[in-house]
Image (tube, rainbow, N blue to C red):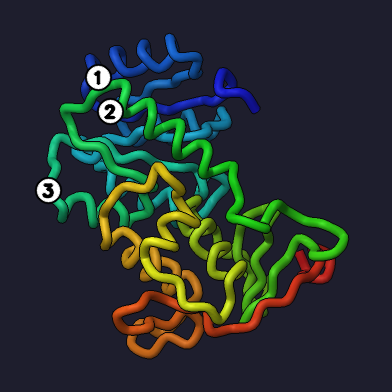
Amino acid sequence: MSASQDHILIVDDDRDIRTLLGDYLEKQGLRCSRAANGREMKEILNHHRIDLIVLDLMMPGEDGLTLCRNLRAGGRNSATPVLMLTARGEDMDRIVGLEMGADDYVPKPFVPRELLARIRAILRRARALPPNLEGPSESRGAVLRFAQWRLDTVARHLIDDDDTVVPLSGAEYRLLAAFLEHPQRVLNRDQLMELTQGREADVFDRSIDLLVSRLRQRLRDNAREPGIIKTVRNEGYVLAASVTPGAVEDGGT
């Protein structure tokens, strides 16, 4: 897919920002839709395929955090990348945004060129698989099994033993795929940032910790005594489970 086909949804209650940002992104070859609130955002998502959402945090009614959390809760758009946009730049706001499932966070006022670079970086990461996870093949299959879970590398979601599908955000999927590609090997934060975000990674140590916490929740892994993704003190994290490949039809999907 070329960059000209990427469809960006801008959700912001400020009409000037919607207009100026949308016009700028369209001049850069992106397609843009605009929404002033959560209702309009949902309407557009119901009728269009959106590649990335630029979502304002501070809006009347349903704010950006609520909309992001609801988006990640499930549905066909649950893995759509979200770039959180806000006039508040404190670390706590950024942390909460990441906890709700945002893929990146840009404070206002922003430089349009930087925002464009972040959008393109997120889109590249959303399409890219970690090393050696290029997709299904005859030798490896499309499903990776570990513990009581299966990861469908085509649909990019989790499946438990009861065949219940658990949607993943783009960031959650990339982190889990990185762990599954390097099972039973300690990975430090820098390695995980490189595997999941590459050179565009922002220096923000807690972002990986927050992602691991979110991923443990998806895996129903006990936060106090995790059995799947374990913390190695002063070193990083390790996937303690063994990983075996399979085919989609073998996974019950």
The residue positioned 35% from the left and 62% from the top of the image is 208
Of 224 and 232, nearer the camera is 232
Q: CA distance from mark 3 to mark 2?
A: 19 Å
Q: Provide residue 217's location: percent of width, then percent of height.
A: 42, 72
Task: Give the amino acid type for the residue marked by disc 2 in the picture.
Answer: Asp
Task: Give the amino acid type for the residue marked by disc 1 in the picture.
Answer: Ile
Mark 3 lies on residue? 90
Mark 2 lies on residue? 12
Between label 1 and label 3, give the one nearer the viewer.
Answer: 3
Assess whether mark 2 and mark 3 are in contact (beta carbons under 8 angstroms).
Answer: no
Q: Provide residue 187's location: percent of width, then percent of height.
A: 45, 71
Q: Provide residue 235's location: percent of width, then percent of height.
A: 35, 78
Residue extending furthest toward the right = 138
Q: Dot 1, how many residues are within 10 Å of its Cα: few (below 14), some (14-19), or many (20+)?
A: few
Is residue 106 in sight in this rendering? yes
The residue positioned 28% from the left and 42% from the top of the image is 105
Of 173 and 249, nearer the camera is 173
Of 106 and 236, nearer the camera is 236
Task: Give the amino acid type for the residue marked by disc 3 in the picture.
Answer: Glu
Assess whether mark 2 and mark 1 are in contact (beta carbons under 8 angstroms).
Answer: yes
Q: Provide residue 244's location: percent of width, then percent of height.
A: 73, 76
Dot placed on the residue nearer the N-terminal end, 1 or 3? 1
Between label 3 and label 2, give the one nearer the viewer.
Answer: 3
Q: CA distance from mark 1 to mark 2?
A: 7 Å
Between label 1 and label 2, give the one nearer the viewer.
Answer: 1
Of 16 and 134, nearer the camera is 134
Mark 1 lies on residue? 17
Is residue 60 in sight in this rendering? no
**Quarter of the C terminus within the rendering:** bottom right
Q: Which element type, helix, strand or loop, lies under badge 3?
A: loop
